[in-house]
Image (tube, grey):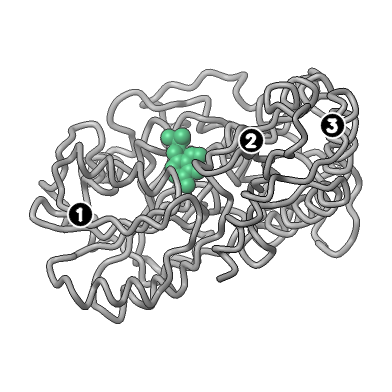
Amino acid sequence: MSCGWPISASIQYQDPTMSAPPLPAPELGEPYLLTPGPLTTAYSVKQAMLLDWGSWDDDFRAMTRDLRSRLLAMIDNDGTYDCVPIQGSGSYCVEAMLGSFVPRDGKVLVLANGAYGLRAAQTLDYLGRAYELLDKGDYLPPRGAEVAQILAGDPAITHIMAIHCETSSGILNPIQEIAEATHNAGRKLLIDSMSAFGALPLDPFKLNCAAFVSSANKCIEGVPGFGFVIARKDEITASKGNSHSLALDIHAQWTTMEKTGQWRYTPPTHAVAAFLHALDLHEAEGGVPARGARYTKNRDVMVAGMRDLGFETLLDDRWLSPIIVTFFCPADPNFTFQGFYDAMKARGFIIYPGKLTVVDSFRIGVIGQMDEHVMRRVVDAARDALNDMNVKSAAPPSAALEERKKLAA
Ligand SMILES: Cc1ncc(COP(=O)(O)O)c(C=O)c1O
């Protein structure tokens, strides 16, 4: 069911090779969020929240049905998988997935190369589930061969937890080779695709994954308020009684939704209405390929411009996701992150601090309602910000380049 809001003509471009007309700027003049969610949304997505919906009313139940079936259509479902929305942020969905699908006597191999992998391990600590952590540090990718080796040595491991795009560095992890190693060893794969689903291909049939999660305020470009778990129905059925938590029990949420069409407990009605409209826009743009193409163009234009200014990316091109990019902070003593942040914000762009532990960095997200035209202005703003700060060179310290060699090795 569509929410009935008009779709802006300017975003109905289908051919990713054609340069599209500019997307409208934020209607109320607020800065662009160059952050990986919450992100800049279309004005019409915000307008879709102007109505109030009764949580048990037929209209809202139809919206919930629609939300679930349209997400399942994005994976070309044949009835194998089902979609269970969960109130809260992305971390609630990760916790629901781990608590529901990993039995109490299960053991998880957590593949970490940044904050979100480590958060999954911390979640398992809270849940009291056994796990082994493969911690690759700030960004080095977990490889299929390493996963295969660990699985061969530890038959107690039942599940692998992988992060699709590790948003803390922006690396696109090699999910296909991780999936193959998992499948070959006869274990079950759980994926956090929070910042990737909707823009990057994710075929759970090809990956043989038991379940994956994402959230409303990432690549579908909705507003925060809920996330969703897409899981094999047989896994959902088998998860009965596993969960440590009443509110995050996927089996219980699914059973109620199947029986009554309702969410257990207060649903984020406005966020659901916004999301349905965001799905309209996603479809009108041309679905995952077109959304991914726009974000890729955003990244390419922004990264090329920043490199022209002398900035260096943490990752080389092979690993750069079209979601968010980490840059090293310049070595110039006049550069401070706060000064750069303030100068960018004054020009209409909110950037993101870095999360590297070894060297100073910052991040620029390329997802949300923005396009290559905006990205060119981001680069202009960065140039002006450097001038404001009297930074002569954006080149990073040599320690940063040494760090980067580890990835090439
Ligand atoms: C890969 C990944 N996992 C988990 C999360 C946590 O989501 P939230 O902050 O919505 O709880 C995020 C947030 O950006 C993320 O990018």
Q: In terms of sequence position, does the residue under pointer 3 or pointer 1 come before the other?
A: 1
Few, some or many C-alpha atoms within 10 Å of disc 1 (few <14, some 14-19, many ≥20)? many
103 with respect to 179 (left or right): left
In the image: residue 63, left or right of residue 187: right
Q: Amino acid at mark 1?
A: Tyr
Q: What distance separates the C-alpha of mark 3 from that of mark 1?
A: 46 Å
Q: Earlier in the sequence, mark 3 or mark 2?
A: 2
Q: Please state if 72 lies on the left or on the right of 256 as rendered.
A: right
Residue at the bottom extreme of this rendering:
184
- Amino acid beneath label 2: Thr
Mark seen at residue 131: 1
Residue 172 placed where, x, y %? Answer: 55, 59
Please say if 216 is above or below 407.
above
Circle 3 or circle 1, nearest the eye: 3
Query: Which mark is in front, 3 or 2?
Result: 3
Q: Secondary structure at mark 1?
A: strand
Q: Residue at x 41, y 57 (%)?
A: 136
Mark 2, residue position = 35
Q: Which residue is mark 3?
A: 391
